[in-house]
Amino acid sequence: MIRLIVIGALLYLAWRIFRTALGKGPANISQGRQPAGQIDDVMVQDPKCQVYFPRREGFAAKVDGQTHYFCSEKCRDEFLADHKAK
Ligand SMILES: [Zn+2]
């Protein structure tokens, strides 16, 4: 009888851990396991003209080790010019 209770408690604990892992799972999984194609669908904001667009259609530029994405080469060039001017 005691073994049944222990097994029941273990099953309950396992279920709780499983549920906790499920609850936190999606955020963790999306952090690095996504194929490159899906990551490119992320919407980003052009820091120059504030327009939102899909990242894969943007123009990337690295500024101070941080990658920025722009809706057009014009915005990118202007942003880089502004940044250098500072
Ligand atoms: Zn722009």
Image (cartoon, rainbow, N blue to C red):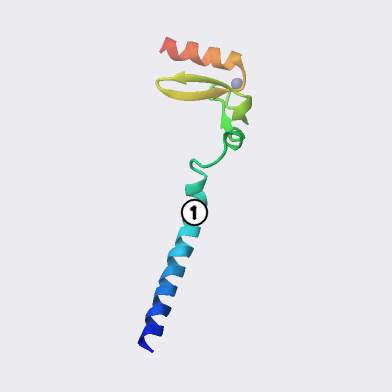
The structure residue drawn at horizontal position 60% and vertical position 13%, both measured from the top left corner, is 74
Q: Relative to 86, does residue 34 appear above or below in the rendering?
A: below
Q: Nearer the viewer, residue 4 or 60?
A: 4
Q: Nearer the viewer, residue 4 or 66?
A: 4
Q: Position of residue 72 (x, y in %)?
A: 62, 18
| Quarter of the displayed picture in which ligand 1 can be seen | top right
Q: Relative to 59, does residue 24 appear above or below in the rendering?
A: below
Q: Position of residue 44 (x, y in %)?
A: 57, 31
Taking the view exactly as shown, the residue that stands out farthest to the bottom is: 1
The structure residue drawn at horizontal position 37% and vertical position 80%, both measured from the top left corner, is 6
Dot 1: within a 10 Å radius of its alpha carbon, few (fewer than 14), some, or many (20 or more) residues? Answer: few
Q: Label 1's element? A: helix
Q: Which residue is mark 1?
A: 25
Q: Nearer the viewer, residue 68 or 49?
A: 68
How many numbered marks, from 0 up? 1
Q: Which image quarter is the N terminus in?
A: bottom left
Q: Which image quarter is the C terminus in?
A: top left
| Residue type, label 1 | Gly
Q: Position of residue 55 (x, y in %)?
A: 59, 29
Q: Position of residue 71 (x, y in %)?
A: 61, 22
Q: Relative to 29, does residue 78 appear above or below in the rendering?
A: above
Residue 57, by quadrant, is: top right
The structure residue drawn at horizontal position 57% and vertical position 34%, both measured from the top left corner, is 36
Q: Nearer the viewer, residue 51 or 40?
A: 40
Residue 7, by quadrant, is: bottom left
- Is the shortest distance between ligand 1 and the CB of mark 1 under 8 Å? no
| Residue 63 located left or right of residue 36 | left
